[in-house]
Image: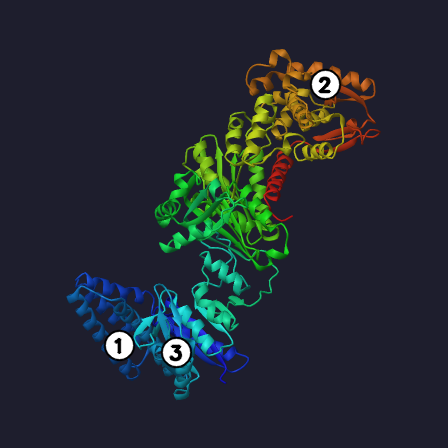
Amino acid sequence: MLNWVTHKFGGTSVASAERYRQVAQILRAETAQSKSPANAAVIVSAMSKVTDALLELVDLARKRDESYLTKLEALRARHLQASADLLDAQSRQALDLRIEADLKDIAEVLRGILLSRNASDRTSELISGYGEIWSAQLLNAHLKSQGAKSTWLDAREVLVVTPGESSVVVDFAASQAKLDRWLDKNSAELVVVTGFIASTPEGIPTTLKRNGSDYSASIFGSLLKARIITIWTDVDGVLSADPRLVPEAVVLEDMSYDEATELAYFGAKVVHPDTMAPAISGRIPIYIRNTFSPQLPGTLIHERSKSSATVKGFAAIDKMALVNVEGTGMIGVPGVAQRLFGALREVGVSVVMISQASSEHSICFAVPQSQAALTRKTVEQAFFAELHHGQIQTIGITDDCSILAAVGDNMVKHPGVAGRFFGALGHAGVNIRAIAQGSSERNISVVVSGTEARKALRAAHAAFYLSNQTISVGLIGPGLIGATLLDQLNIQLERLRREYRIDFRVRGIMKSGKMLLTGSAEQQIDLKNWREALAASTTVSDLSRFVEHVNADYLPHAVLIDATAGDEMLLHYPEWLASGVHVITPNKKANTQSLAFYRKLRESARSANAHFLYETNVGAGLPIINTLRDLVQTGDKILQIDGVLSGTMSYIFNSFTGEKPFSEIVKEAKAKGYTEPDPRDDLSGMDVARKLVILAREIGMETEISDIEIESLVPAALQKGTAEEYLAKLPTHDAAMLALLTDARTKGQVLRYVGVVDSNGKAAVRLKTYPKDHAFAQIGGSNNIFAFTTTRYNMQPLIVQGPGAGPAVTAGGVFADLLRLSYALGAPL
């Protein structure tokens, strides 16, 4: 028995003379690289768009539109030009005569259609198959001109099928006998076979319907008992998702027949399930490879995948309607599903997915949107009596839905796959309307709103590490902290994508007066030159437009980073969180508003499963909030929190040695970015008071700013006016501050501006003195120190200390919150 391999080249692979040359090169290379000699059957489609053009001729002739003659001449010119480009004059003579003869026959048939205004299905199939006949002869003639031992086979001579309405039934016994006889009479190393076409048992030309050329490859692979079938197309292989919806989709190395069938059923660009059947029956491996990148290995489809991936890929079907039939009269009644789906089958409704409650109170199923009205009418007629007697209460239809399917043989071996799948959609704010899963656990399908399909697909794809976790980022306030954060992101973005599969896409930057937005869907701001781009932007700041742009419906997650110092933005936090947009901020004012607003923030976040992160509200980049939460959530009781809570005030009193006036120290702190834009926010004690409110609320206290005892270091006379006016008049306060310093030194102590809150809810901000050996006296620069006295840490408090102010550490803390968000949304740790 001969050793065979089968290749199939689609229309884009043979679209021109140059493409035919490329096909010949591929065949030569495959033969040279083969480990064992083999004959090759090469199944070809018509040149790109020729089949559609031939069918258009039939339609035009039926309508008595004589422009079909012009279009027929265009087809003639295209094929004769390809012949001229591929072959020398002597080699193409016979081929050109055959093409001319075929075109004459077609013209006569079309003339008859024009006169009768009628074209049977047989006539359409006869004419539509000529593209493959010409294509096979073109490739064969070129191969022979290159010295190959090649011949061509008109599949109508050997392939016998019985046509149906949308498919065909292959007579494999008759086809095998005819092919064997043909092979006995024709010997060649290469046989170029026409795809798509066949004959009926009566010998009448017909086609294999749509996807027919792929089917031809599988049929001939089975008849020839080929060791492999290679489908050459215009993609690198089977992708883990539609790259138009998920640009990060990856080429799958291999997959099982079952996985390929499931993905193909749900619309993935794989070989159609029906066309694979002969190959599956013969256990013939199928390769999907790219004609235009033949050096790539492509995707192997075979009996059992070697991959350990839990989920192999995702697919989606759009323009679906979800139908829900509900009623108490269905409970415990045998045959309801049979009546329902039998009635739908009779009228030709395609049911794509079914989900039924175990109570039998309802059945929901998905059908194409175009069949929704017919479905309603059919169900109403089938259950007229039950509807009349109130036994069925509802026949509801939800339009504009999409089905999203996760596919993988290994899902059955891994608990929690469904949880991760549903969790990913939940994190992305996508509502699941129906769920279906077979007992094989190879496929989990969900119905979602069509408007959320792209977001859902990207979220699920990232959740199983098939692509990076993508988060759309918008920054409001590119001041000291915001600008530093953007610079830190610029340095780390590529490493995060490469090593941690986290893709932070900064898609908007807004400041007072103007904003910078990305142009296209997948674009992101180039952080190497964001300053220049923002300066050159002419887009006027528009908060609603900014938020809408960042929260794009095609990206699974969006976060807004508020790096402003004011309170204008915080009023929008509840709205953003309620819409599913995550919020990160170093601005502590939101968490220190009224308790009613504080609770509204948390409720808004909970309602939409959104995250509100603010680690830098207390201690800048120090892990204060998370340390406190760990203590509380593990059951420890907080007895007291005290310390130097302000990096600004720490810097000021560490620098205040008496050598420089107090006012100069304050100006230096502002210049270095340690203070708030108005230093009085620090020196008034309000900054520390806000931190105490945040800490108190984190441990469950209902503390308001008004409950804090505050010792302000801003003289009453300087509390009004601008920040500049305050700094100008501050030297009048230098003597009083020097006196406090001198008194402390006389006692061998140091000045520290501290905050304290205890378990009874008492909280205060004070300027205190401490012995030089006290922990609070040991810190230097802008360092903070926090002492947590708890039931567990009672004899010696838990100390956290380090830099508590400055743009670098604060921006680093915001960056850390951004990473926490990505992990919460499913990025790999």
Whether residue 563 is visible = no
User: What residue did someone put label 1 on?
Assistant: 99
Q: Position of residue 330 (x, y in %)?
A: 48, 44
Q: Earlier in the sequence, mark 3 or mark 2?
A: 3
The three-letter amino acid code for the residue at tag 1 is Ile
Q: Position of residue 84 (x, y in %)?
A: 29, 76
- Disc assigned to residue 372: none
Examine the rendered structure and indicate whether residue 54 appears above or below residue 576. below
Q: CA distance from mark 3 to mark 2?
A: 90 Å
Instruction: Name which residue lies at 65% across and 48% down.
Output: 829
User: What residue did someone put label 3 on?
Assistant: 192
Q: Residues within 10 Å of mark 1 (few under 14, many from 20)?
A: some
User: What residue did someone put label 2 on?
Assistant: 762
Q: Nearer the viewer, residue 713 or 494?
A: 494
Question: Which residue is most to the bottom?
Answer: 185
Instruction: Name which residue lies at 54% across and 27% down.
Output: 570
Q: Nearer the viewer, residue 718 or 763?
A: 763
Q: Nearer the viewer, residue 314 or 33?
A: 314
The three-letter amino acid code for the residue at tag 3 is Val
Q: Position of residue 233 (x, y in %)?
A: 43, 66
Q: CA distance from mark 3 to mark 1?
A: 17 Å
Q: Earlier in the sequence, mark 2 or mark 1?
A: 1
Lateral position of residue 373 relative to residue 501, left or right? left
- Give the SS element for disc 1: helix
Q: Nearer the viewer, residue 361 or 444?
A: 361
